[in-house]
Structure formats: structure tokens, C-alpha cells
Amino acid sequence: MNAMYSECQRKRPRLGGIVSATILFASIAVLCAMSHAADAAVRLKDLTRIDGRQDMMILGYGLVVGLGGTGDSSRSLVTSQTMSNLLREFGLQVPADSINSRNVAVVLVTANLPPFVRAGDHLDVNVSSVGDATSLSGGTLLLTQLIGADRSSYAVAQGALSIAGFRFEQAGSLAQKNHATSGLIPEGAIIQRTIVPAPIAVDGSIDLLLNEPDFTTAQRVSEAINRAMLSAAASTVDAGRVRLHPGALDTAGFVSLMAAIENLSVEPSVKARVIVNERTGTIVAGGEVWISQVTVAQGDIRVAINQQYLVSQPYGPVIGANSRVGTVVAPEAQISVDESQVRSVTLPGATIEELVKGLHSIRASSRDVIAILQGIKRAGALHAELIIQ
């Protein structure tokens, strides 16, 4: 920006006076607008995805062995039955009720299968205990098939677990960090089937799906593709779908087209939102959040109650070793009320940042700011979606 401004200063005509200053300021305004638009632009790769490209969730059921007495107990019939079935595969006939070991745990193995994976690729898997095991630390997952929703096998997993926590228990004492009953096996699964989705429909069209559906953004995406004069014409179907009509393409042509499209830049239209976290007092607002004219008055009433007990012990004959006749215990409470002066702030039309600064100027706490934002929303002066976490 500084270099562009210096170049404008060097090349501008020596007009002098008001006309020269006006042209200079107009040029600076245009350059600032161009710089802001360039900063706000986002690649289509980050705004959209191709229809037909989605992750697939896969699931498996297996055994983790090698646990140092922290596995499932004998109450877990699933574990003993699974161990019996496993040993039968190796020619050993061991009844399920004869298996009593705390070194084994039944687990569920989960993973997300991304598109365009090939047979032989590796994948991270998550392992979670199903029974009453106290820790999976030091365990090894045995060969486990991972199936999809169609009951077909897509990968197999096996390997040593990585646990981001620990749990030690002895004589009633317990030391624990995070959860030791779930872990991760980095690259622990091997893909068994090649998955290549078909993004081109029967009629030869390709659909781009917006991550955040919005009519304005969808129209801008369509206009950007048509303006680039590529080999595909784009049309907006709805708020979340832009359809491409590339015609007949071979594999190389499809790759070249999508590589050119995903690197186009578009400025998305972001919905006005205000996110409030009541636990931490955090307020996050977008840049298009505006507040109509509103007046906020805030005051505090503090009530303090101090209770003490008065004991009256008149003289009299001794009945017990430590008591006297007529001992009276009477509670006495002192109540004080401190009402601070009501402070107000009037905003003729401002952003969230100006509102928060104005509220802090009247010494409003973070909790007060959150309550005031909720009140402004109910009054219809906050023109944004208010999300309370």
C-alpha cells in the first residue's frame, strides 16, 4: 500500500490547490478500497466443495491386549466371549467362563475415510474402551476390520495405542490426567479399497456446494467463474449450489478446469453474528454488525447481610457441668443496602466495538455487557444473530 501511494505521488500531475488534493484523496480512497477487497477475498477452494466428495465414517470392533491389569473385569461377558472366539481361530478351545484376565479390553475403533484414497494408504484411527477397563495405556490393538454404513470392509487397523493421559490407582488413592480409556493409533489403518468419487453427473454437469449457504455468495461465485472465461459456464441453482456446465471433458481437462476454478477469489457475504460465551465473558462479533439508536441504563444494588449470635447466660443453680439455667442464644442480623447511581449511555447507531467501549465507560462488567446485549436483541436494536454459548 505504501509503495502504491508513493508511485501515485511520483506520477500525479502538478495541479496544485484544491483540485490536486481532491484527486489525491480520491486515488487513496480507491486504493484503500481495492486493498480491502483483496484482503476480504477468499479462494473458492476454501468456500466450496465438489458435490460427491465427502468423508465416509467407518467403524470396527476389536480387542486391545497387553494391559497391565487395567483391562475389563470378569463381569464383562463381551470381553470373555470375544477372547474365546479369537482363541478358537488359532485352534484353542477355551470356554468363555474360563477366561479371567484384566489384560484385555474390548474397544470400538473409529475413523473418517476421506475421498480419493487409494488401496495401501494409511489412516489415523481412534480407539475407545467399551467395557469397564480403567486404562488402555500400553495396549496394542489386534487386527480389526473397519466397515462402512453399507457393511462393506474398507480398511484394517492394528498397532500400539498412543494415550494422552494416565490413571494410577492404589489403596484407594487415585491420580488421573485426561481420559486414559481412549487413544489414537497414528496411521494405524491401511485402506483396502480405492475410492474415487464421480463428481460429474449423468448430464455432464458439476456441482459446487458452498460450505456456508448464502444467495449473495453463490451469485458471486457464479459471476467469478463466468468472468474468468473458462471452458465451463456457471449458473446459481440455490443458496448452497453452483452448477458448472463444462461439456465433454477427459480426465486431464477435468483436472485443469477444477484447478483453475478452485484458485479463483471471491469475497463472501458473511451473515451478521454475535457469539457470546457466558462462562468466560467472551464476545466475538463480525464486521457487519450494527446497532440502532438505543439507550442503556445500568445500576447496581448491593445487599450485605451480617448475622451474629448473642448469648445470654444469667446466674442460677448449676444443672450440668457446663450449662446454666436460662441460657438463651438469640440471632441478630444487620442488613445494609448500597444502591449506586444509575449510569446511562446513549448510542445513536454504532458497532459492537463502540457499544462495548461505551458500556465499559460506565463501568459495566462482562456479565452486565452480556445481559445488555440480550436486552438490546429483544428490543430489536441489534441487527445480528445472537448466539449464546
Image: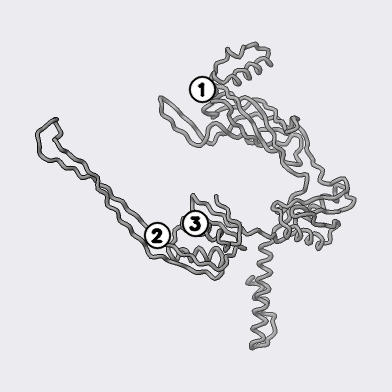
Circle nearer the viewer, 3 or 1? 3
CA gap, disc 3 to disc 2?
A: 13 Å
Which one is nearer the viewer's eye here, 54 or 264? 54
Which one is nearer the viewer's eye here, 78 or 83? 78
Residue 281 image point, x, y percent: 49, 54
Which one is nearer the viewer's eye here, 251 or 47? 47
Q: Splitting the image into 4 quarters, where does residue 155 fall?
A: top right
From the viewer's perspective, is 364 left or right of 201? Answer: left
Mark 1, residue position: 69
Assess disc 3: are there few (<14), some (14-19) or many (≥20) residues with their C-alpha within 10 Å of its C-alpha: few
Question: From the viewer's perspective, is residue 57 above or below residue 41?
Answer: above
- Considering the numbered disc 1 on the image, is that residue within a helix, a strand or a loop? loop
Q: Quadrant of the N terminus?
A: bottom right
CA gap, disc 3 to disc 1?
A: 52 Å
Instruction: Tell me what residue is drawn at x 64 percent, y 88 percent.
Output: 17
- Considering the numbered disc 3 on the image, is that residue within a helix, a strand or a loop? helix
- Please report whichever mark, 1 or 2, sits nearer to the chain's N-terminal start: 1
Mark 2, residue position: 300
Q: Splitting the image into 4 quarters, where does residue 6 fall?
A: bottom right
Residue 355 image point, x, y percent: 52, 65
Q: Amino acid at mark 2?
A: Asp
Q: Amino acid at mark 3?
A: Ala
Q: Amino acid at mark 1?
A: Gly
Mark 3, residue position: 371
- Considering the numbered disc 2 on the image, is that residue within a helix, a strand or a loop? loop
Question: From the viewer's perspective, is residue 296 above or below residue 63?
Answer: below
Q: Residue furthest front?
A: 326
Circle nearer the viewer, 1 or 2? 2
- Please report whichever mark, 3 or 1, sits nearer to the chain's N-terminal start: 1
Disc count in the image?
3
